[in-house]
Image (spheres, rainbow, N blue to C red):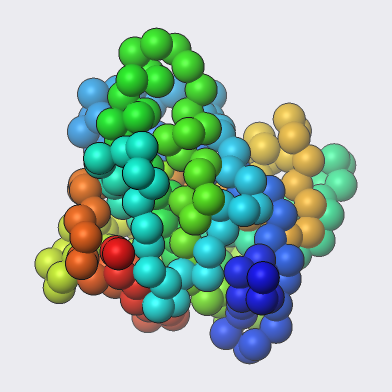
Amino acid sequence: MNNAERNFIFTNATQLQVGTIYCIGRNYSAHALEMGAEVPEKPLVFIKPPAAYIYGENAIIDRPEYSQEMHHEAEIVVVIGEDIPHDAGDEIGNYICGYGIGLDLTLRDIQSVAKQKGEPWSTSKSFKGSAPISTIVPISDFSTMYPQLTFSLSINGIVKQVGNTHLMERSIPSLLQYISSIFSLRKGDCIFTGTPQGVGPLLSGDNIQASLDSYITMNCSVL
Ligand code: MG
């Protein structure tokens, strides 16, 4: 395994070993609606292991053979640079070391069955390679620790998803506070902050372009 397979890679060429990947569900009301669901009363959190990570730039995404329907969910990814103490309070944003764009790859057919049966989402959400993430933009490139960001995903040149941080049901600091209060956020952990509307299937041969404002664009394709 080379470093690119287990490390975040920053635009300034520094690297950081990937820890736990926390994911937030239904953080954009229009996406909750398209899934026939409501925005939950408390943040919906699930976890992907470090092995779910792949460096997304020029990645070739493979669909597990036990699924026939893999969906893209483009999301802003927040990377944590230092272990967060439980008393971080309003200073919690100081522990963010960068932002990127990622794909919360989802096996929708497997997830639908899990939802019906009340079973966990691990096999639909947390399989190996299920978290392609772009090169990370260091926090020092932003004028604030909580920048307002637009992001988008195109497939074969056609825009499928557009989102903006101001459309989030729960802000990045409130998500950090919530996750930190229940789990423990440590150096190298990251948070997928939820997907906007427009999720849909990825097909063999698709070329994907995901952009985080003008900061970074990730190109990858589907095997
Ligand atoms: Mg998602």
Question: Percent x, y for residue 107?
Answer: 35, 39
Question: Percent x, y for residue 72?
Answer: 31, 51
Residue furthest out toward the bottom: 12
Total numbered circles: 0
Give the vertical position of 46 relative to 147 (above or below): above
Q: Residue at x 52, y 76 (%)?
A: 135
Would residue 68 be seen by someone viewing this image from the given angle?
yes
Question: Percent x, y for residue 222?
Answer: 29, 64
Would residue 168 be seen by someone viewing this image from the given angle?
no
Q: In the rendered view of the protein, which quadrant contains the C terminus?
A: bottom left
Q: Viewed as shown, does residue 106 lie left or right of 203?
A: right
Residue furthest out toward the top: 117
Question: Percent x, y for residue 209?
Answer: 29, 72
Q: Residue at x 72, y 71 (%)?
A: 16
In the foreground, 29 or 81: 81
In the foreground, 95 or 56: 56
Give the vertical position of 127 relative to 165 (above or below): above
Ligand 1, by image quadrant, is top left
Q: Residue at x 44, y 12 (%)?
A: 118
Residue furthest out toward the front: 65
In the foreground, 166 or 121: 121
Give the vertical position of 103 relative to 58 (above or below): above
Q: Residue at x 30, y 69 (%)?
A: 221
Q: Viewed as shown, does residue 20 lie left or right of 197?
A: right
Task: Examine the image and state in which quarter residue 34 appears.
Answer: top left
